[in-house]
Image (spheres, rainbow, N blue to C red):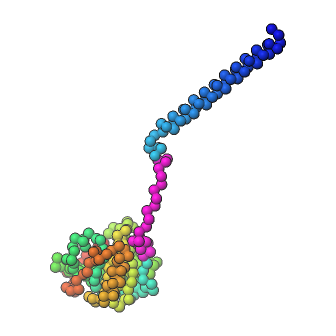
Amino acid sequence: MTLISRRRTVWNYQNKIGKTKSALMVRLWMSLFAVFACLGLWEPVETRRARFKPTPPKPQKTETDKAIENLTPSQSFTIDQMSGKWYLLSVACRCKNLLNAGFKLESTTVTWTIASEKVSVSTMRQLNFVCYEIKQKYMTTKSSGQFILKGKCGKRPADDVDVVVLETDYRSYAVLVFKKGTNITVKLYGRSGDVPDNIVDKFEGHAKTFNLGLDVVFPYPAYGFCEAAERVMGKII
């Protein structure tokens, strides 16, 4: 065999080996790709859902939510001028006890006593023909006109009630808001058992901002007030 023939034979052999190696490499990469694909497909369904779960959009705040967030007391509030007797004239609330009571409400008076920034509130009302006095204490806050009524146990902030004097002229009327969590109650008080219609309109307008319409506004009777307590009760939320 001539030298040229030998060289040609060696070249053909090397070329054949090169093609074989290339084919093996292609098969190896295809096998690896198939293994990784299977691992991805056999991933637990819960894991895939958690990984690709879209983020839900944040719920838009309602006008009521905004009103609660922007709840601020009356400007230039003077606590001393709240002292004295107030008549509860009307309440706007979705409370179950009021909804169940309907128009069977008892006349109620509230007396504020302020001493060294401490507010004692005495509520007089009739229940089953018995006059009760309910004693409460409002804690002052950094915001003038805003107070905190501690819950029954006094340890859980979730049980606390925020009390805000929303509007008052001290002489004839006061609109107060009581907030516990997301529950809102708006109350209209008067220095006497009656106030002008424009004050009632103001109260109903405030209630409406908290989505409390006329269907959940309960007027209290302006007669039959208790003059003296037959029984005394502690703090009631």
Residue 68 position within the rendered picture, expressed as x and y whole percent measured from the top left: 41, 72
Query: Does the rendering let one see residue 125?
Result: yes
Q: Which residues are magenta?
A: 50-71
The quadrant of the rendering that contains the C terminus is: bottom left
Q: Which of 140 and 232 lies nearest the eye of the viewer?
A: 140
How far across and how far down the image is residue 201, in percent?
33, 84
Q: Residue furthest left?
A: 129
Image quarter of residue 97: bottom left
Q: Position of residue 63 (x, y in %)?
A: 41, 71
- Residue 197 vs 70, above or below: the answer is below
Q: Is residue 57 magenta?
A: yes
Task: Identify which residue is drawn at 49% across, 37% down.
Answer: 41
Residue 55 in magenta? yes
Q: Residue at x 51, y 34 (%)?
A: 38
Q: Is residue 234 visible?
A: no
Q: Quadrant of residue 215?
A: bottom left
Most extreme residue toward the bottom, as rendered?
171
Q: Residue at x 31, y 75 (%)?
A: 213
